[in-house]
Amino acid sequence: MESLELLIKLSSKRRERNKNMSNLKSRGNINSGHYRDKMYKHYATSVGNNLKHIQLTTKYRYKVMNQEKLQVFCKVAIEEACKRYKIEIVILKVKEEYIHLMADLPRTMSDAKALQVIKGFSSYLLFRLYPTFRDVYPKGHFWNAGYFCCPVGVDFDNVFSYIENQ
């Protein structure tokens, strides 16, 4: 029960931070260009990024995240999976039956490995946080086997606004 309270507290802090970011955006102080300025990372012998636009859907496209609480659980689970494997989230939107995510993967991580990590660990956490999902998914497969993943290059602003307006 303590972990549930901790997750709710973390999610409320994240919501407050996102609300502050939205206020800054509405006043014109920040936009997707802010992220673009820091888009390239500098390493010892190279400069670059590995930005990806990712979409995951729930198994059978069931609309299981129809409550705000479940969307928060899903968001927290994905954030924890990404944090554990050093995947930086630029923007994340959770809907009833799918999620959109723009993330900067470590340069040594392949798309398939990143999706395996995100889907596997987030579903593991979701089934622990909300055991009722076992009624809908008795085999323990929360995410659909397929996914959408493409690199984000010069279309950064378009992809950012697309995900933001979901």
Image: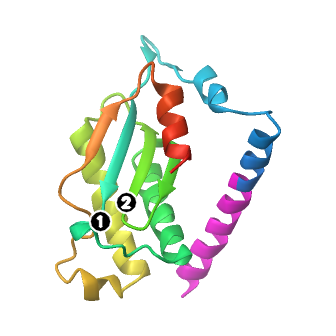
Q: Which residues are magenta?
A: 1-18
The answer, for residue 87, to whether it is visible in the render is: no
The image position of residue 37, as x and y in percent, is 63, 21
Q: Nearer the viewer, residue 43 or 104?
A: 104
Res. 58 mark:
1
**SS type, badge 1:** loop
Q: Spot the residue most to the top.
A: 45
The image position of residue 121, as x and y in percent, is 33, 62
Q: CA distance from mark 1 to mark 2?
A: 6 Å
The residue indicated by pointer 2 is 98
Amino acid beneath label 2: Tyr
Name which of mark 1 and mark 2 comes first in the sequence: 1
Above-or-below relation of 13 to 2:
above
Residue at image coords 29%, 65%: 58
Residue at image coords 27%, 89%: 135
Cβ atoms under marks 1 and 2 closer than 8 Å? yes
Query: Is 17 contained in the magenta span?
Result: yes
Above-or-below relation of 156 to 77:
above
| Left or right: 20 in relation to 150 | right
